[in-house]
Image (cartoon, rainbow, N blue to C red):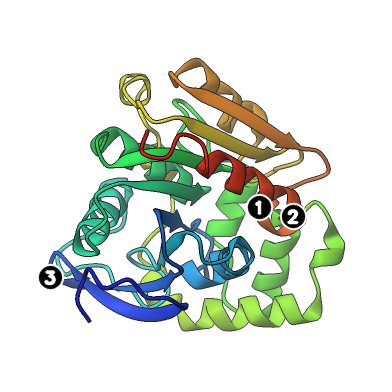
Amino acid sequence: MSTREVPTVTELRTVTVGGSPVHVMDSGTGPAVLMLHGSGPGTTGSGAWAATAQALGTSLRLVAPDQAGFGRTPIPAGSRGGLRLWTEQAAGLMDALGAEHYAVVGHSMGGAVALALAAARPRQVTHVVAVSTMGAPGAPLSADLDALWAAPAGPAGARDMLRRLFFDQALVTESAVAARAEAMHAGAAAYASLFPPPRARWADDLTLSARTLAGIRAPVLLVHGADDRVTPLGTAALPLLEHLADVRLHVFGRCGHVPALEHPHEFRQLLSCFLGRERGH
């Protein structure tokens, strides 16, 4: 397929970026939106964003890759995971797809990548939505993120991880646990190298400097759960208000680390409204 041919339905495919394969969910037509998943074991682009992409319809081109070390995207030979690799790979992917301007939506780790990408590519990135984001200067590694990164593959590890992610424990169903356990098992080999102990250094790697954040020109929407234990509101989102030039924050009460799943309808409305602002900003 030509890199400039726009698919009209959801398509799973592999794009070569910097000589290394990147597995991508590509859906819809229209202004491009890069959607970046978080860092939990078993996370993939399609797993994190398929429901949101389906609900947003076909008026946007939604590109959700498996980032290096997750899902079906390997870590490039001679490299290791980290903010620089994920940011460069995201920029290279959108170049390969022929997207000259695009918005970026990122969850948790993906939020830090989204902010770094906006700083690195100010002419390309039009909007940023950083959900339950990492990246704030000085943000410590929470006990729940430490445990999440260390979660062992299998039903017990999957159940513990989901309990930490959600405020509403009714979402920790047997089917959700089984699906996460299967995804964790499938991605275990590549994931094992990403966040070995001591894990505080990997949280530090996902931190952006005040200078980098101050240089971001795109408008930024921060979306956060008031009850997020993985990236707590007070240390993860609130400090970013001091550093970003064009920023707004939406907080969901009774919500943990995954607003897209705990408050799906309002989350999609937020996204649609914000991404519809000032096209071509």
In terms of sequence position, does the residue under pointer 3 or pointer 1 come before the other?
3
Height in image: 161 above or below 234? Answer: below
Camera sees residue 261: yes
**Which residue corresponds to mark 1?**
268
Q: Position of residue 149 (x, y in %)?
A: 53, 58
User: Which amino acid lies under the numbered mark 2 shown in the image of this protein?
Assistant: His
Q: CA distance from mark 2 to mark 3?
A: 39 Å
In terms of sequence position, does the residue under pointer 2 or pointer 3 come before the other?
3
Q: Residue at x 70, y 75 (%)?
A: 156
Q: Residues within 10 Å of mark 3 (few under 14, many from 20)?
A: few
Residue 196 image-quadrant placement: bottom left
Q: Nearer the viewer, residue 135 or 100?
A: 100
Q: Residue furthest top?
A: 242
Which SS class for mark 3? loop
Q: CA distance from mark 3 to mark 1?
A: 35 Å
Q: Quadrant of the C terminus?
A: top left
Q: Residue at x 55, y 79 (%)?
A: 183
Question: Do residues under tags 1 and 2 come within 8 Å of each other at their CB atoms?
Answer: yes
Q: CA distance from mark 1 to mark 2?
A: 5 Å
Q: Which mark is residue 19?
A: 3
Height in image: 98 above or below 158? Answer: above
Foreground: disc 2 or disc 3: 2
Q: Position of residue 223 (x, y in %)?
A: 62, 39
Q: Is residue 280 left or right of residue 179?
A: left
Q: Residue at x 59, y 61 (%)?
A: 56
